Image (cartoon, rainbow, N blue to C red):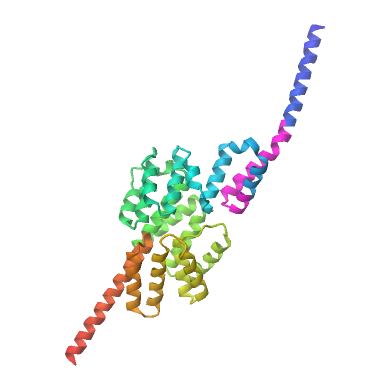
């Protein structure tokens, strides 16, 4: 009788546990399903879907919103779309991952001193060195940037995938500035292979097409970028779009890009640069030279600084040749 009672009690407990598991599974299944949807959207960099999923979690997630995966998804989303008050949110975290995100946000907002201060606090050497390379590139010191990013002794593959991709894309910029087509292609292919859906790869493909005069490809990529309405306004991207508009003689798009640049950091320098290139295309060398000199004095940085200096050097060389020819003509006359 005692054994029978214990057996009956055990069966009841098993049955109760079975139904409890079913109930719990039914209750949590929507959250697991939504979490998977969020992961898929993140892996594909589908920011429209990410926004929808985050809104669902905000409405229904309750205490589950405190989970690291949900918090990080929200922070990454804000980082990519240029969210407001992001710096104060990221500053609450002391780990290297979130601090590096804070560094990227500061760098995007042209806060070089603040970005450097964040780097000084990082424990992971590779992330710190990547950050130094990004700062050097932003300041137009390409050789210094390459020195940081091409350090053979560093275990670059120990970094997160997004950071590795960022390193490759920065080396692409360096290759473009130095006119090294081979480095540009190798590093770009490495970035695409590592993280093909990363929107930064699309932006870089557009940048390369502009730099190499592949105008049809640049137009196609620009149309794709235009559909990504979540993108924050970006000085470099708008400048490249303006160059495409100049080539296609599309004055409306040129005007639109210049209007956007007026509201962005270092926008005035980029406007002078764009107008300088426009003047050169129309054959107005002296006007183009004055505008490029103004752009450089106004703080033009990075690859645009190198491009402006190269164009300026070409103008000066041509003007010197023209001056010498005039002297020879005058002497012979």
Residue that lies at the very extreme toward the left in this rendered image: 331
The quarter of the image holding the N terminus is: top right
Residue 303 spot, x, y in % from top left: 37, 61
Locate residue 200 relative to residue 4 in the image: left or right: left
Residue 221 place in picture, x, y as percent:
52, 64
Quadrant of res 292: bottom left
* Range of residues picked out in magenta: 24-51
Q: Nearer the viewer, residue 69 or 114?
A: 114
The answer to whether residue 180 is seen in the rendering is no
**In which quadrant of the rendered view does residue 48 lie?**
bottom right
Q: Is residue 33 magenta?
A: yes
Question: Between residues 110 and 178, which one lies in front from this camera angle?
Answer: 110
Q: Position of residue 8 (x, y in %)?
A: 80, 15
Residue sitting at x 49%, y 52%? 193
Residue for point 30% across, 74% down: 315
Q: Position of residue 139 (x, y in %)?
A: 34, 56
Q: Quadrant location of residue 311?
A: bottom left
Residue 157 sits inside the magenta stretch: no
In the picture, the quarter occupied by the C terminus is: bottom left
The residue at 78%/13% (across/down) is 7
């Amino acid at each position: 009788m005692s054994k029978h009672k214990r057996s009956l009690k055990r069966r009841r407990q098993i049955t109760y546990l079975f139904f409890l598991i079913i109930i719990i599974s039914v209750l949590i299944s929507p959250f697991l399903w939504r979490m998977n949807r969020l992961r898929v959207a993140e892996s594909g960099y589908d920011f429209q879907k990410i926004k929808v999923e985050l809104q669902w979690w905000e409405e229904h997630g309750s205490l589950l919103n405190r989970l690291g995966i949900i918090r990080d998804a929200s922070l990454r989303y804000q980082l990519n779309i240029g969210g407001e008050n992001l710096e104060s949110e990221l500053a609450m975290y002391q780990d290297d991952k979130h601090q590096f995100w804070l560094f990227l946000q500061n760098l995007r907002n042209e806060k070089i001193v603040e970005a450097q201060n964040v780097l000084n606090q990082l424990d992971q050497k590779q992330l710190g060195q990547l950050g130094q390379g990004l700062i050097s590139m932003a300041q137009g010191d390409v050789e210094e940037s390459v020195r940081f990013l091409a350090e053979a002794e560093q275990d670059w593959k120990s970094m997160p995938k997004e950071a590795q991709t960022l390193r490759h894309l920065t080396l692409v910029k360096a290759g473009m500035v130095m006119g090294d087509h081979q480095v540009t292609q190798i590093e770009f292919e490495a970035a695409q292979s590592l993280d093909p859906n990363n929107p930064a790869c699309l932006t870089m493909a557009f940048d390369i097409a502009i730099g190499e005069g592949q105008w049809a490809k640049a137009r196609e990529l620009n149309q794709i970028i235009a559909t990504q309405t979540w993108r924050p306004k970006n000085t470099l991207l708008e400048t490249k779009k303006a160059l495409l508009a100049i080539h296609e003689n599309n004055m409306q798009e040129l005007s639109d890009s210049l209007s956007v640049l007026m509201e962005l950091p270092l926008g005035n320098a980029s406007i002078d640069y764009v107008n300088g290139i426009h003047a050169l295309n129309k054959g107005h060398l002296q006007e183009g030279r004055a505008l490029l000199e103004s752009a450089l004095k106004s703080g033009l940085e990075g690859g645009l600084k190198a491009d402006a200096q190269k164009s300026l050097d070409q103008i000066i060389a041509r003007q010197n040749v023209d001056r010498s020819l005039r002297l020879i003509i005058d002497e012979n006359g």
